[in-house]
Structure formats: C-alpha cells, structure tokens
C-alpha cells in the first residue's frame, strides 16, 4: 500500500473515527483503525464491536492495499504535523506502516486487516431521512436526560419511535433517568411510519451528534430491531441497539397540573445558577416559592449558609413551595429556545412539566425534591 494524503483531510477523518476506539481493549485489534486504499480514495474504519464508523476521503493512491494501525497514535501524529503538509503512508514488509511528512518519519506496528472485526448489519428494512438540523434537535433536546446508571441499561439511550398523539402520528425521541424526562417530537418522515421503537445507545448518540454538527444535508437512517445505520455522505455509522424494553413513559407525564408559572427563561436560569452556589454538592436542591407575581428562589445549606433571590413571574394558583435539583432544572432550561418558559405544577410532591413556547414539540418532566 502506498498513499499520499493531505494532512488536514487525514486529521479530520481520523478525528471522526478514532473517538469510537476505546482507550483500553482486551483485543489489541480493537485499538486499531483499518486503512483501505483503492481507486483514488482512502477508507478508515474503527469499531468497538457495538458501533462501527467508516469514512472515505480522497487521496492519491500509488499502490492499493489495506492494513490496521493504532488509531490514537496515528491521530496524535497527524495532529502534530504541520498544517497543510502532505502525508505519505506506505506499508513495508506487511507489518510496518511508514508515515512521512516533510522531514518527519514514523514507523508504526501493524496488525493484519483480516483480524479486523467487521460488523454485520444484516437486513435494515426501515429507511427514512432527516435533515441534519432535525436530527440535531432530536438529540440535543433529549440526550441530557439519558441515564448513566448501568443497572438500568434500557435507559442508557434515546428511545426513537413513532407515537400516536392528538395531532396524529409523530416521530418521537424520549430519554429519562428516573429524575427527569425529555420528550421531543416532529412530523413522521417518509418511510418511518412502520418502524419498531428502538433505543439508540448513549455512545452512538454522542458520535452522531459530533458528525451532525459538521453536516448540512440529509442524514439517511436505516434500521431493524437490532441495528441502526446513519449515513452522512462520506461517513457511515452502524450501531447495535440496546436490547431491552423502554418503560411506558406516558404514565410519568402528569395530565392535571393546573398551576401555571410563566417567566423569562434566561433570568430564571441565571438566578437558579447563582443561588445554587450555596447548595451542597450532594443534594443540589433549590426551593421555589410562588406567590402572585413573585417567584423566590432559596437555598439553605447547613454547611455553606443561605441564598435567596426574587424574580418577577406570572403565576396562577395558590401560593406554593416546591424543591428541585438545581442541576436538573438548569439542564432543562438550557434547552429552551424562546424567551419564556412555562412551568405546570400540581403539588410539591407531584411531577412538574416544563414547556418551551418556541418549540411546541418539546416537553420536559422534572421530579421534585424534599426541601
């Protein structure tokens, strides 16, 4: 194999694929990226057996071939090479990749490409496309609520499914960790109507989010009960899905919350952030006291002291005190696009709903805390 490739193109492609590679691996081959060169293109592939990413980039191929080399090492080399330099990759003796750029020369140990595991995606019968901005919205407004608790593995991802609503069928993304829930929906794209409900793993969601940031076209999505594939032009990500049943989240969304609080979202977030400086790291609780057109935020910490702040708000209902985890509350407020956030409450023990006036397809539920 003999390839010449522009340093920035190599770095960009390696940046996408190497993040899939785990730092510690029981199988040495999983630390490697597979390089395949043929027909004026270089294809780089990385996998951790649960997710695989393949990206093609243009290059001058002097001699076609394939090998695998340590992903993070090659990425670090490319990162440190001069901007705009030409990088030559040549396979020598079948087990050494020589990387040269200007006066720099590196020799990397290779492993045979035949040892590299290939993810078999099988048949993916359900196919549809989302504009990059739509996929980004579904991810951003849901992923903060994904659970990191490994024992409840079925909550370790975003539940993507077609749901019935008062407006008919909607494509919906839902995530919850038991303390808060995010539900984001949009029109059902062509081809998605009969899809099964699938749980896209947290790591896959993070990789897709990075790629969608740099992409403006349509993202093609194909899926089955067990696998999902995202195609972004020259990049293809294939991932296993979480094998589990997502809970019936509709039972968590309250229907009778008749007390409404409406206020400036930015001011609410800033005040919450300020008073939570005093709260203990363990509970992070903040108390909201609502009375007429005044909202009082307060924190009382035995270790640190107290903090209060008053805000103008429109509140309809009897005076009420309720406590929330300030970090969870701030995570939700960070997703609100509009100037105004609506908070629907029932009582100090019941789940609370938060809505964004600018995005009717987004709904958030937050469980209260004792304060």
Image (cartoon, rainbow, N blue to C red):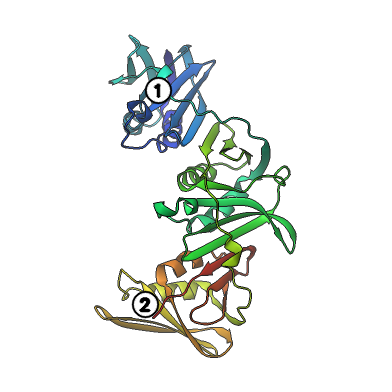
Q: Position of residue 99 (x, y in %)?
A: 33, 20
**Nearer the observer, 89 or 189:** 189
Q: Return the x and y of residue 133 as percentages of the image width and height.
A: 60, 49
> Which residue lies under the disc numbered 2?
275
For residue 339, say whether it is visible. no
Badge 1: residue crowd in 10 Å (few <14, some 14–19, many ≥20): some
Which residue: 63% across, 51% down? Answer: 161
* Label whose residue precedes the other's in the sequence (1 or 2): 1
As drawn, which residue projects farthest toward the left?
A: 303
Which quadrant of the rendered structure holds the C terminus? bottom left
Q: Would you say 40 lies left or right of 81 here? A: right
SS of the residue at dot 2? helix
The residue at 48%/25% (across/down) is 118
Marker disc for residue 86: 1
Quarter of the image holding residue 260? Answer: bottom right
Residues packed near mark 2 inside 10 Å, few (<14), some (14 to 19) or many (20 plus): many
Q: CA distance from mark 1 to mark 2?
A: 53 Å
Quarter of the image holding residue 251? bottom right
| Residue 356 visible at all | yes
């Amino acid at each position: 194999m003999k390839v010449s490739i522009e340093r920035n193109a190599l770095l960009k492609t390696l940046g996408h694929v190497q993040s899939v590679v785990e730092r510690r691996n029981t199988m040495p081959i999983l630390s490697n990226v597979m390089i395949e060169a043929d027909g004026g293109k270089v294809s780089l592939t990385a996998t951790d057996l649960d997710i695989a990413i393949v990206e093609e980039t243009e290059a001058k191929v002097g001699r076609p071939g394939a090998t695998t080399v340590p992903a993070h090492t090659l990425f670090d080399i490319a990162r440190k090479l001069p901007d705009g330099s030409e990088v030559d990759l040549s396979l020598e003796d079948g087990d050494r990749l020589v990387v040269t750029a200007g006066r720099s020369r590196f020799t990397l140990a290779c492993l045979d490409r035949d040892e590299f595991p290939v993810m078999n995606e099988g048949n993916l019968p359900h196919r549809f496309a989302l504009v990059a901005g739509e996929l980004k919205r579904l991810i951003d407004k849901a992923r903060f609520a994904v659970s990191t608790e490994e024992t409840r593995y079925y909550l370790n991802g975003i539940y993507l499914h077609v749901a019935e609503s008062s407006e008919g069928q909607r494509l919906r993304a839902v995530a919850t960790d038991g303390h808060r829930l995010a539900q984001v929906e949009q029109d059902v794209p062509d081809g998605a109507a009969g899809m099964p409900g699938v749980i896209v793993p947290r790591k896959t969601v993070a990789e897709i989010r990075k790629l969608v940031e740099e992409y403006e076209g349509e993202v093609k999505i194909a899926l089955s009960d067990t696998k999902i594939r995202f195609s972004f032009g020259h990049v293809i990500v294939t991932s296993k899905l979480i094998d589990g049943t997502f809970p019936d989240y509709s039972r968590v969304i309250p229907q009778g919350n008749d007390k409404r609080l409406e206020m400036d979202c930015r001011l609410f977030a800033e005040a919450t952030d300020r008073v939570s400086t005093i709260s203990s790291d363990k509970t992070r609780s903040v108390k909201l006291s609502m009375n007429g057109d005044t909202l009082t935020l307060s924190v009382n910490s035995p270790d640190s002291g107290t903090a209060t702040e008053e805000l103008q708000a429109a509140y309809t209902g009897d005076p009420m005190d309720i406590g929330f985890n300030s970090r969870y509350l701030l995570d939700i407020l960070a997703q609100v696009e509009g100037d105004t956030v609506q908070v629907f409450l029932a009582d100090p023990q019941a789940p609370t709903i938060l809505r964004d006036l600018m995005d009717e397809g987004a709904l958030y539920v937050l469980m209260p805390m004792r304060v």
